[in-house]
Image (spheres, rainbow, N blue to C red):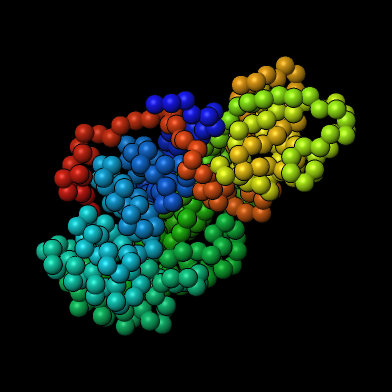
């Protein structure tokens, strides 16, 4: 309808598929894979990502809230979808109608889900969430026997999974991980003694999925690694490819004399004749203001430093040392240009956060363009008519 400013994100679905297959090959063949696509697939676009991964063979999808699950169902995703944080009171009928799976950790949840399932004459697949040491959500070990005994009062609720979450998963050798996994294994034994046969046993995120002991879990739920982020803090996983590439273009070039300052606060003052490129991207787009100090971009396959403070809608780049730079040259903020890459971990280190937040903070006002997009198989369209696999 109109020309957009040249600030955009490219999502490389071929790289996404590559990362999925890399993770799939690293797991035992009997372990199912749940792809975490919550938070709009960490800013990558949940619908396009889920369509790609459904074709690639993902067994389940994980979201945080019902609204995220409904977006996938409406887009034709017919694989099981798990609400990792459970349903909010009042959402149970919607959950049952769309055959969503949900984490449960309170008796009141079971009561509401049973009532909703009974009203619709359906069953509801549930994953019992255990607190093995995260201290966030989950049934406490001491509460588990009574909780399991009560579960028998809810015949419409199928206990299909047992799950927990590791607090130190990005440091595989940390002793807290082994303690949590020991508590988890003990809890699974109690679940089975109570007469349940859960299909899915799962312990955590990308890192724990790859580091957990063989034979303990039957489901892995990678998130950050799918998108090319490193799951381990101290040992990079080889072969992961960045999926998100954040670009803009040079809108204006100007020559500044020595002593001339740039941007708010006069943090940058030219010490020599300096060429400055103005790029139409800023912190409102997710180009974090803290990158002003020491951050860089890629232009023509070379690094160029940010000059002064990043503004809400503009960033200024010192291109004095880059030959033949011109207006409309592509600027890579995140991702790769030739052999050079700026990865989410680099941003995260500079701004004091993690790669998850780097991806999620890229603003909705930046359009996403998908490279190598694939369509769902024709059979998936049955989801819109309620033909959902659970």
- Residue, x 26% and y 80% (percent of image)? 150
- Residue, x 37% and y 38% (percent of image)? 48
- Position of 95 with respect to 288 (left or right) is left
Q: Position of residue 389 (x, y in %)?
A: 21, 49
Residue 177, can we see it? Answer: yes
| Nearer-the-camera pick, 68 or 310 | 310
- Position of 235 with respect to 389 (left or right) is right
Residue 243, can we see it? Answer: no
Which corner quadrant of the image does residue 239 belong to? Answer: top right
The extreme left residue here reads 121
Question: Image height check: is 129 above or below 355?
Answer: below
Q: Quadrant of the N terminus?
A: top left
| Nearer-the-camera pick, 255 or 153 | 255
Q: Position of residue 3 (x, y in %)?
A: 47, 25
- Residue, x 19% and y 67% (percent of image)? 116
- Position of 332 with respect to 380 (left or right) is right
Question: Image height check: is 118 above or below 24?
Answer: below
Q: Position of residue 130 (x, y in %)?
A: 40, 71
- Residue, x 29% and y 72% (percent of image)? 109
Q: Quadrant of the C terminus?
A: bottom left
- Position of 320 with respect to 105 (left or right) is right
| Nearer-the-camera pick, 62 or 116 | 116
Q: Position of residue 6 (x, y in %)?
A: 54, 28
Which corner quadrant of the image does residue 384 belong to? Answer: top left
């Amino acid at each position: 309808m109109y020309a957009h400013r040249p600030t955009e994100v490219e999502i490389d679905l071929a790289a996404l598929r590559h990362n999925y297959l890399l993770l799939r090959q690293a797991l035992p063949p009997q372990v199912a894979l749940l792809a975490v696509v919550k938070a709009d697939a960490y800013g990558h676009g949940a619908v396009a990502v889920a369509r790609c991964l459904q074709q690639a063979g993902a067994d389940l999808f994980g979201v945080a809230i019902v609204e995220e699950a409904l977006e996938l169902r409406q887009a034709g995703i017919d694989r099981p979808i798990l609400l990792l944080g459970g349903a909010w009171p009042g959402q149970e009928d919607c959950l049952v109608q769309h055959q969503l799976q949900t984490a449960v950790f309170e008796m009141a949840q079971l009561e509401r889900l049973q009532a909703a399932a009974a009203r619709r004459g359906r069953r509801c697949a549930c994953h019992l969430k255990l607190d093995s040491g995260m201290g966030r959500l989950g049934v406490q070990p001491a509460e588990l026997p009574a909780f399991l005994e009560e579960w028998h009062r809810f015949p419409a609720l199928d206990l299909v999974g047992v799950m927990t979450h590791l607090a130190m998963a990005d440091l595989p050798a940390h002793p807290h991980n082994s303690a949590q996994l020991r508590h988890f294994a003990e809890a699974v034994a109690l679940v089975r003694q109570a007469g349940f046969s859960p299909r899915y046993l799962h312990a955590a995120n990308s890192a724990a999925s790859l580091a957990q002991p063989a034979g303990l879990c039957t489901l892995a739920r990678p998130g950050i690694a799918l998108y090319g982020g490193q799951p381990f803090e101290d040992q990079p996983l080889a072969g992961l490819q960045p999926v998100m590439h954040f670009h803009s273009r040079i809108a204006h070039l100007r020559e500044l004399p020595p002593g001339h300052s740039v941007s708010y606060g006069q943090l940058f003052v030219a010490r020599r004749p300096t060429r400055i490129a103005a790029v139409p991207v800023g912190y409102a787009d997710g180009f974090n203001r803290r990158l002003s100090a020491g951050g860089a971009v890629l232009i023509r396959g070379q690094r160029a430093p940010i000059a002064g403070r990043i503004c809400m809608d503009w960033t200024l780049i010192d291109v004095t040392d880059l030959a033949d730079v011109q207006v409309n040259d592509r600027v890579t903020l995140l991702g790769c240009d030739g052999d050079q890459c700026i990865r989410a971990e680099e941003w995260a280190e500079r701004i004091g956060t993690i790669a998850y937040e780097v991806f999620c903070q890229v603003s909705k006002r930046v359009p996403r363009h998908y490279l190598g997009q694939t369509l769902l198989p024709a059979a998936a369209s049955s989801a819109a008519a309620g033909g959902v696999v659970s």
